[in-house]
Image (tube, grey):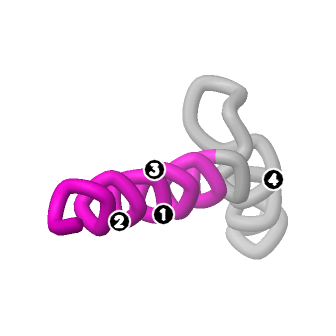
Amino acid sequence: MQPATDTAVMAYKGLDGVPLWLLFGIAILALVLFGIAQARKRK
């Protein structure tokens, strides 16, 4: 296999079959929820 296709497959399938975009989505969602929780605590 060529390195370019390897990278594309990694980006699509990610680690252990979990797509990287899904991991990024979960991370962003967690940060947003954490921010909302912090904002509510301050009020």
Relative placement, left or right, of 16 versus 35 is: right
| Residue that badge 2 annotates | 35
**Mark 2: secondary structure:** helix
**Mark 1: secondary structure:** helix
| Residue that badge 3 annotates | 30
Which badge, 1 or 4, comes first in the chain's sequence?
Answer: 4
What type is the residue that disc 2 sits on? Gly
Q: Nearer the viewer, residue 20 or 2?
A: 20
C-alpha separation, residue under disc 3 versus residue under disc 1 = 5 Å
**Disc 1: CA contacts within 10 A as few (<14), some (14-19) or many (>=20):** few
C-alpha separation, residue under disc 4 versus residue under disc 3 = 21 Å
Which badge, 2 or 4, comes first in the chain's sequence?
Answer: 4
C-alpha separation, residue under disc 2 versus residue under disc 4 = 29 Å
**CB within 8 Å, label 3 to label 1:** yes
Which badge, 3 or 2, comes first in the chain's sequence?
Answer: 3
Q: Residue at x 83, y 65 (%)?
A: 5
Is the magenta region chiefly helix, strand or loop?
helix
| Residue that badge 4 annotates | 12
User: Which picture quadrant has residue 34?
Assistant: bottom left
**CB within 8 Å, label 3 to label 2:** no
| Residue that badge 1 annotates | 32
Query: Which mark is in front, 2 or 4?
Result: 2
Q: Percent from the top left, x then y, of residue 30? A: 45, 50
**Magenta span covers which residues?**
23-43
What type is the residue that disc 1 sits on? Val
**CB within 8 Å, label 1 to label 4:** no
